[in-house]
Amino acid sequence: MFTGGPIFLRGNLKEKHNLLEIIRNTLRDRINLVIFIILAATILYSIIVRFLSLGELSFWGDDGMTYLSTVSVLEHGYPRLPSGYIMFHNIASSYFNIIPVLLFGDNEFAYRFFSALTGVLIIPLIFLFAKELTNKYIASVSSIVIALNTWQIEYSREARYYSEFQFFYILTIYFFYLGFFKDRKVFKVLAIISLFITIQIVSLGVTLIFLFIPLLVYRGLKGFFKRDTIISFLASGAIVIAVVIHRELFWKVGLSFYSSGNNTDIANPVLGILYKYFGNFSAYYYRIFGEIYPKAFPLFIYGGIALILVYIFIKRLRNQDEHNISILNRSKASINIPFNLLLLYFIFFSNALFYGSGNMYNQHRYIYHMNPVFIIISAYIIFELSKIIIFALRKIFVRGGDAGFEKIKDHSRKYLYIILVIFIGASAFAIDHIDMVENFKITSRQDGDPVNPIFTPSSTFSIHYDVRTASEYIGSRLEDGDIVISTYPLKTAMHIKQVDHWVWSANLVSWQPYRSRDGIYYDNFFGVPLIRDLFDLQKVLNENPDKNIWIASIDSIERSGHVDPMIIRFLEENSQCIEIVGKDGVSSAYLFPALEDGGRAFSMYDNVIPGEDEVIRAGVESSGTTFLFNDRENDNYLRYGWSFIESTGTWADQKSSLLFLDFEELSDHYLDLAMKALPDPDIVQEVEVFLNGKSIGKFVLENVELTEYTAAIPGELLVEGYNVLELRSKFLMSPVQLGINEDPRNLATYFSELKIYK
């Protein structure tokens, strides 16, 4: 029964003894010992700059997605959001984060913990990965640069997927290399498992399937089409295809890329999906490295090309640690290529070029996981150029210098030390953003402090916004029955724990998690109605006079692309309602207190007094007055709620649009309006006409062509001077959202002509 025990124990002891012996033998070499000490110190440093004051800063960017999906897992066992939809985007991250949240509590430190941890673990991983493809010197410098690199440190301190995705992406490549290139069976299995996890962190991991392309080159057709490789390829392909189909057809939230600009004219769903991923091209995703690393990037491009040509045509200068393979092996011709270097380039550019195709947003965060690959390649080139320099100098000044570089190491280590000095010095000069002192300033950053847009989750950020101050203030004072309006509830939810309305005025193509019901849009994170314009906001305020209404006006308020400028102006005009302002000087908590008697009567056009040139004179002619919306001389009348004049008319770009009329006679009149709506297949536009606040007609615009509608104007509603004609539409929609054209404007109703007659 127990006969296997001692054998198993002896096997374990033997393996342990062998491992210790390998470590001892490795560290007996002085260079290896130095490398070990430096790497240990570097990892200790990286732990400090990644974890120190990790919970100090407020959430920003899309950190709230991490919070919301994690608490949903803790509550339901899977990321079921308050809206009822499932958060498949970053789903693996949701499970990774529950452990630190359980250990450290519901706070910013806990939600950033796993990101910081993988930010540390990437350092030894890069050493192992780079050592496998190059040598221990390139691996050491690459690891040190990764540990000290500002971009790495900044993203390791984010409560988002960037750091963990990078770690698992590189881990998958490492396992893949050991498994399929080095033919070690256990790593083949680990590679597929790691690929699956990586794609579940973020679907950008589908690019890992491209690794089978260099494998085909490496093995050739005969070597590639083996059972284990084909099974692995089919399994990986199935994972990728399933993820893409699932994402495109079933996700209701988290569609943060490959959305805007989709060609909705493509009826075939397969072609439509392909267009999303391959329809356009932008060079942004490799050019951004030229902006981040202005000195290393030319070396990365031109130095790499030169080095590859040197390896191909000058045999004695080839890297002895490089895996050179022949791609043309004939009796009279043979071309040997540096496979490992080209593999690294392939990994980098297959990502940069793929992300540049389709309709992906140009944000550097999506290519961050390639930062270590860029650094390894740069270190590789610098090291090899250092060797070539020494070889050239030795050939010039030392007798017998043409014997080949491999003789240098055999002759003396002094040449190696000289190479390392040049290599380390050149690396420190060429690779930017490895300032140890500057890195510690990151750990002492406060909310409201300036930040470098290159190293922020969005290139639009220039300061670290303070969401916490305003959110905590509202959350600690919230009472039953209060209404909470947020300009970005994903960021405020952690501290407020409630949201009733989301202010989002941008077009609903670049931001797609919503659903429409009877002209009202509901977001798919919280299931709450969107406030699209000032009319919506004032409607909530006016219809709930007996309730406290809190507005968390955080950093989105600075973006006209997120929040309607009229809403921004309204909040500025009601600054007396500000309870507290965040450390960033932007994020604020507003309170519109409940009223005991009376009600709120906010209007989009409070305090608007038209000038004389903004009032249409009506009824001057016996035949009536005709106002043409395509006459550019009428531009001065179209100031409130109108877009620009077009060839046949003008769009109202607010739900409420105004015209001012001065009637010659205060008697009964008729009003004719020629108007049309956008052809929305799901909802019919409605326009209600008000004169001096009283409804005089309501029209359903079932015909998408220009149609004339008539309303009666009772004389008793008219007043001396100007009269306010309000044209109130039911909803706003953008042509790009409906697939009509690329017009991103939010539009209500199109008007071509107005007639007033007795």
Image (cartoon, rainbow, N blue to C red):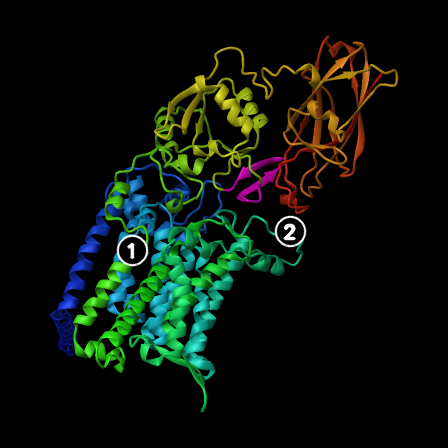
Horizontal and vertical percent for residue 361? Answer: 50, 49
Q: Is residue 753 left or right of residue 249?
A: right
Query: As displayed, is residue 301 above or below residue 59?
Result: below
Horizontal and vertical percent for residue 445? Answer: 29, 37
Q: How many marks?
A: 2
Mark 1 element type: helix
Front label number (1 vs 2): 1
The disc label shown at residue 264, or none: 2
> What segment is highlighted magenta in the picture?
508-524
User: Disc 1 designates what residue?
Assistant: 429
Mark 2 element type: loop
Q: Is residue 173 left or right of residue 390?
A: right
| Label 2 packing within 10 angstroms: few (<14), some (14-19), many (20+) | some
Horizontal and vertical percent for residue 402? Answer: 27, 80
Query: As displayed, is residue 757 above or below residue 444?
Result: above
Occupied quadrant, residue 316: bottom left
The type of residue carrying mark 2 is Thr
Query: As displayed, is residue 306 above or below residue 580?
Result: below
Q: Earlier in the sequence, mark 1 or mark 2?
A: 2
User: In this orientation, which residue lies closer to the viewer: 96 or 51?
Assistant: 51
Q: Quadrant of the C terminus?
A: top right
